[in-house]
């Protein structure tokens, strides 16, 4: 796709920001300590990145899906973990409020999330409900105007630094499958809310992940998000947008792999010549370039489809599936082209290999994307 002047300009600005601010020192610190970088969060907030895809009337910049995808891609091209800093508010965090919130909820939560003043995360997965997210064991029982929540959510990105979490809980225990699940916004400092340990992850370190434990948490009725018993539908709708973001993240990582490998292949000499002159190496680079180009086109096409208000579920799944796998093919080849140095932390491709690995897992594994794609193909 040829970007129009506006999107081309946005790409340039996102790229300049990431290349200037995501220094190698910061990247290494995030990877080594796993700690959230509040200064970076504040800086990105000041630039308005937290609200890129949140409408202007709710404090965001009201940019379209393509702009959002370009931001995540360009940030991930420099650092995958930092791309999540600006992603969550625009997708899994702010998304459910935008999709299902009352006007009052939108007016209250979205401006705070868009400005970066507050962090809102998404808590769907449970120990027994991963790919089959509808198998939720968390319960919400009505008590007067309130609800009492009990359960455990797992792998919640950003939970250790969050102010609010969108939590899914069974409100009708008699309902089967994905029915009878409702969505709530909980305060992370409410009595009964606690965190599991910070997960020690393979990659995307610096954006902490933990369980959220709910023990008799009283949630006021005005924190019910969307209609009672109908929350699962909104989880799936949110994940459509989220998958687009993670597909864009994959494109950024894949592009970085290609750039790192190309540079190295031209510099590194063996048998008296640059290794790029060996067909075995140059064809790997060609395969990577083809993967990056195809993945990017799928992401931009899915973004346009979503923007046009069309059913983009299949397009988002295809983009996420292809781009996530492509990023991992590229990361594998980038390490291979670096030889032994690719296995050493001094070289960025070592981290890219680890960062890429989660993309075919979160927001629906590659197998679940295949289930969605096949289901769409075969329905009717
Ligand atoms: C770093 C990280 C961050 C995360 N962030 C969040 C977050 O912010 N919020 C949140 O709610 N969740 C989050 N998750 C959870 C993530 O979405 C789940 O890990 C993912 O959906 C898979 O669930 P599972 O890990 O339980 O694996 P399982 O569902 O147990 O899957 C195990 C394997 O079985 C395969 N499988 C399962 N069902 C099928 C099927 N029907 N057909 C074929 N194969 C199948 C899977 O593809 C996988 O290979 C995060 C996970 C990680 C690792």
Image (cartoon, rainbow, N blue to C red):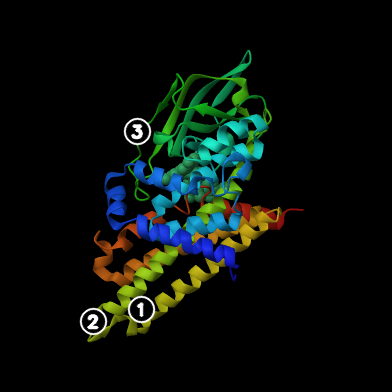
Q: Is residue 108 left or right of residue 40?
A: right
* 205, above or below 154, in the image: below
- Graded by Cα atoms within 10 Å as few (under 14), some (14 to 19) or many (20 or more), the crowding at tag 3 reads few
At x 54% / y 31%, what residue is drawn?
167
Which residue is nearer to you in this view: 280 or 46? 46
* 140, above or below 327, in the image: above
Residue 376, located in which quarter of the rendered image? bottom right
Q: Which residue is mark 2?
A: 270
Point out the tag, 2 or 3, that comes first from the N-terminus: 3
Residue 337, located in which quarter of the rendered image? bottom left
Which residue is nearer to you in this view: 224 or 75? 75
Q: Which residue is mark 1?
A: 281
Callout 1: SS: helix
Inter-mark Cα distance, 1 to 3: 43 Å
At x 51% / y 38%, what residue is drawn?
113
Callout 3: SS: loop
Inter-mark Cα distance, 2 to 1: 12 Å
Point out the tag, 2 or 1, that comes first from the N-terminus: 2
Inter-mark Cα distance, 2 to 3: 47 Å
Which residue is nearer to you in this view: 185 or 217? 185
Whether the residue carrying mark 2 lies under 8 Å from ligand 1 is answered with no
Point out the tag, 1 or 3, that comes first from the N-terminus: 3
In the rendered image, residue 177, in percent from the top left (x then y), is placed at 64, 35
Q: Do residues under tags 1 and 3 come within 8 Å of each other at their CB atoms?
A: no
Q: Which residue is mark 3?
A: 197
At x 52% / y 57%, what residue is drawn?
247
């Amino acid at each position: 796709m040829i970007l129009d002047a506006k999107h081309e300009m946005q790409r340039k600005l996102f790229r300049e920001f990431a290349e200037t601010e995501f220094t190698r020192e910061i990247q290494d610190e995030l990877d080594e300590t796993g700690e959230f970088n509040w200064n970076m969060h504040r800086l990105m907030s000041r630039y308005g990145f937290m609200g890129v895809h949140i409408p202007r009337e709710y404090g965001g910049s009201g940019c379209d899906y393509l702009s959002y995808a370009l931001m995540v891609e360009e940030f991930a091209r420099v650092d995958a973990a930092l791309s999540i800093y600006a992603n969550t508010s625009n997708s899994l965090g702010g998304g459910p409020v935008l999709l299902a919130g009352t006007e009052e909820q939108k007016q209250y939560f979205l401006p705070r999330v868009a400005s970066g003043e507050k962090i809102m995360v998404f808590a769907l997965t449970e120990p027994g409900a991963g790919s089959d997210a509808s198998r939720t064991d968390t319960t919400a029982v009505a008590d007067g105007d309130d609800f009492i929540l009990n359960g455990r959510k797992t792998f919640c990105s950003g939970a250790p630094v969050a102010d609010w979490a969108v939590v899914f809980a069974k409100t009708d225990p008699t309902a089967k499958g994905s029915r009878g699940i409702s969505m709530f916004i909980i305060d992370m400092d409410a009595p009964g809310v606690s965190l599991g340990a910070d997960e020690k992850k393979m990659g995307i370190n610096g954006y902490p992940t933990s369980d959220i434990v709910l023990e008799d948490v009283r949630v006021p009725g005005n924190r019910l998000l969307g209609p009672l018993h109908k929350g699962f539908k909104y989880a799936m709708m949110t994940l459509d947008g989220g998958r687009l973001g993670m597909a864009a993240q994959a494109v950024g990582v894949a592009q970085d792999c290609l750039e790192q490998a190309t540079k190295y292949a031209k510099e590194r000499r063996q048998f008296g010549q640059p290794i790029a002159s060996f067909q075995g190496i140059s064809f790997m680079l060609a395969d990577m370039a083809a993967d990056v180009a195809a993945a990017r086109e799928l992401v931009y096409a899915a973004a346009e489809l979503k923007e046009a208000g069309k059913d983009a579920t299949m397009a988002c799944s295809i983009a996420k599936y292809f781009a996530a796998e492509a990023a991992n093919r590229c990361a594998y080849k980038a390490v291979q082209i670096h030889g032994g140095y690719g296995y050493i932390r001094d070289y960025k491709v070592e981290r890219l290999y680890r960062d890429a690995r989660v993309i075919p897992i979160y927001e629906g594994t590659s197998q679940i994307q295949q289930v969605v794609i096949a289901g769409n193909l075969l329905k009717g």
